[in-house]
Amino acid sequence: MKKNKQLLYISLLASQGVVITLLERSIPFPFGFAPGAKLGLANIITILAIFTLPSKDSLKVVWMRLLVSTLLGGTLSTFLYSFAGAFLSYLGMRAVRRLGPERVSLIGVSATGGILHNVGQLIVASTIAQSFSVMLYLPILAFTGIFSGIAVGIAANYLMERVVTIKNFQKEEAKNDQLTKRWYDAQYTKEFKELE
């Protein structure tokens, strides 16, 4: 039963990520000074997966989200950009998360993901254009990446504090993984202090 619950949770996260991605594609660019920049709201789902699932299962969520959202309205080029951005972002957030809640917050982890997502997309763009000059766009995209990463981190943090299902999956994962336990205990301590 536990395995079925986990599969259902992975499927729900991936499908929510797909819906968020499709909705975000349908709205105009929010950053007029940075054409092509998006808020990256689907990263909320990636963060939830990283903080509540084992690494192989959180990777499944990212893969499923990318593949299904590409099949439902993407092209090969959008897949390449999304793939590079999503996986560089995913690896970076997992690496920064290892610093622990004593050194970095969930919002900091998210901001790292926001910047690295843009770096991944620029690497693909410079490879396609066969010109390193595309990377000159990085300072502008880094700024939007930090801004959107903070916004996404705040939203993910709110969900992790308020949604019981997410808390329960994090608690289950904390029994098997020391790093998740440190993050879970830090969250629990914070909530306990707020109640005092």
Image (spheres, rainbow, N blue to C red):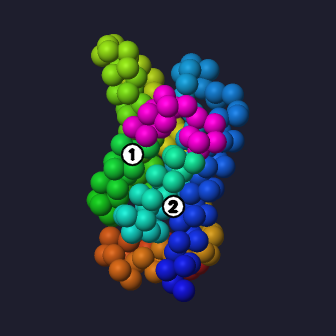
143 vs 36, nearest the viewer: 36
In the rendered image, which residue does mark 1 sit on? 87
Magenta stretch: residue 72 in it? yes
Start and end of the magenta stretch? 69-85
**In what element is the residue under mark 1?**
helix
Q: Earlier in the sequence, mark 2 or mark 1?
A: 2
Regarding mark 2 in the picture, which secondary structure is present there? helix
Q: Main secondary structure of the magenta part?
A: helix
In reply to whether residue 2 is colored magenta, the answer given is: no
Q: Quadrant of residue 23?
A: top right
Q: Position of residue 175 (x, y in %)?
A: 38, 83
On the rendered image, what quadrant is the N terminus found in? bottom right
Amino acid type indicated by mark 2: Leu
Q: Amino acid at mark 1?
A: Phe
Q: Which residue is most to the bottom?
A: 1
Judge whether 146 appears above or below 33 on screen: below
Q: To which residue does mark 2 refer?
A: 48
